Amino acid sequence: MILNQEVIKNILKELFKKRNYISEGDLRVNFVVALDRLYQPKYIIANFPVKCMDRTVYEDLRIIDETGNIFLIEFKYCPSKVPIPFGGFEVETRKRTPKKKRVARFNEDCERIRQMVCATGEKENIQAAFCIFITNQKNLTKNTSFSFEDLSEDFKVCIQEIKKDNCLGRSGTVIEKNNLPTDEKGIFEKSGEKENE
């Protein structure tokens, strides 16, 4: 399994054809189910803790394939209203955060993930990381340094891919991996997997 922007975009387009999502958590769970069904990675770990300087940060998703290749995914889901998610009604998700703050937070996510890849990518066999920004707020998709494209009739997506090559000539923040989380902290193992396989 090799994850790239096209694979991720296709999964997201299929998800948004079915319905809209009330929250980032709702979207992430459905993304994990679709990814597992289509590509059957060995592990999908949610909220993976990584020590960064003096604090612990969390990767939204860490995907590990059968050969030990690792892919990271970070979501930023910013809807203002979610049209017709269930039963034909519209959901107001939250008060709007100013555009500059939302875009700045996505930029911070991209930089944090880049630092993780640069600091631990070779040692941990991280192949790539993907920062995904999904929104139906038109003001967030215009006049930014990020390139958005249609995901559905209502939503647009921006996917930033970060590879080990992006680290050449840069010094990353020193990041240490915490102990692997227990099942309660988000390991989704494939069900029915035999030990010897």
Image (cartoon, helix red, strand yellow):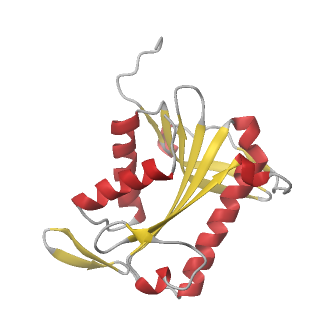
Q: Position of residue 53 (x, y in %)?
A: 80, 57
Q: Position of residue 6 (x, y in %)?
A: 45, 51
Of 92 and 114, the residue lying toward us: 114
- Taking the image as drawn, is residue 56 in sight? no
Q: Quadrant of residue 182?
A: top right
Of 155 and 85, the residue lying toward us: 155
Q: Position of residue 89 (x, y in %)?
A: 17, 76
- Residue 45 is left or right of residue 192, and the answer is right
Residue located 63% across and 65% down the image: 109
Q: Residue furthest top?
A: 196
User: In the picture shown, does residue 16 fall above or below 33?
Assistant: below
- Taking the image as drawn, is residue 73 in sight? yes
- Residue 171 is left or right of residue 88, and the answer is right
Q: Position of residue 122 (x, y in %)?
A: 75, 38
Q: Residue furthest left?
A: 87
Residue located 37% across and 51% down the image: 11
| Total marks placed | 0
Residue located 39% across and 43% down the image: 35
User: In the picture shown, does residue 16 fall above or below 69?
Assistant: below
